[in-house]
Amino acid sequence: MKRGSIWEYDAVMRILLQHPKRETEIKGPRTVGQLLKRLNLLPEAVLVLRGDELVTEDEALKEEDMIEIRPVISGG
């Protein structure tokens, strides 16, 4: 989309959420923390993966990233 002399992109990140398993798309870019806030998820309650890599709240995500969010499960 072109607005004046500035090109704007409506790119989205694909987000795979586990438990229950579902997929959604969120406009990017944003940080992991911003993404979790947008999805109303507590950072302490989930693990966020980009590919096979665990990412932290302050890491920047790109539109082309495939993100998986898994709940933290503990037991004993």
Image: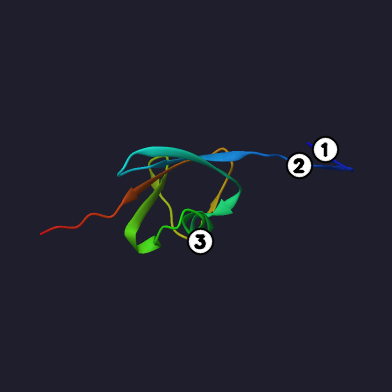
The answer to whether residue 66 is above or below residue 59 is above
| Residue 37: x %, y % from top left | 49, 59
Residue that badge 2 annotates: 8
58 relative position to 22: left or right: right
Instruction: State if disc 2 and disc 1 touch (CB < 8 Å).
Output: yes
Amino acid under label 1?
Lys
What is the distance, in whole Å, between disc 2 and disc 3 at their CAs?
A: 24 Å
Q: Residue at x 89, y 43 (%)?
A: 4
In percent of width and height, residue 69 lies at: 38, 47
Neighbor class of circle 2 (other Cα within 10 Å; few <14, some 14-19, many 20+) is few
Residue 49: horizontal and vertical position, in percent? Answer: 40, 46
Which one is nearer the viewer's eye here, 22 or 9? 22
Residue drawn at (59%, 41%) of the image = 63
Numbered mark located on residue 2 in the image:
1
Mark 2 or 3, nearer chain start? 2
- Judged left or right of residue 26, residue 72 is left
- Identify the image quadrant of the C terminus: bottom left
Tag of residue 58: 3
Residue found at x 53% / y 58%: 34
Name the one closer to the observer, 69 or 23: 23
Placement of the N terminus among the 4 image quadrants: top right
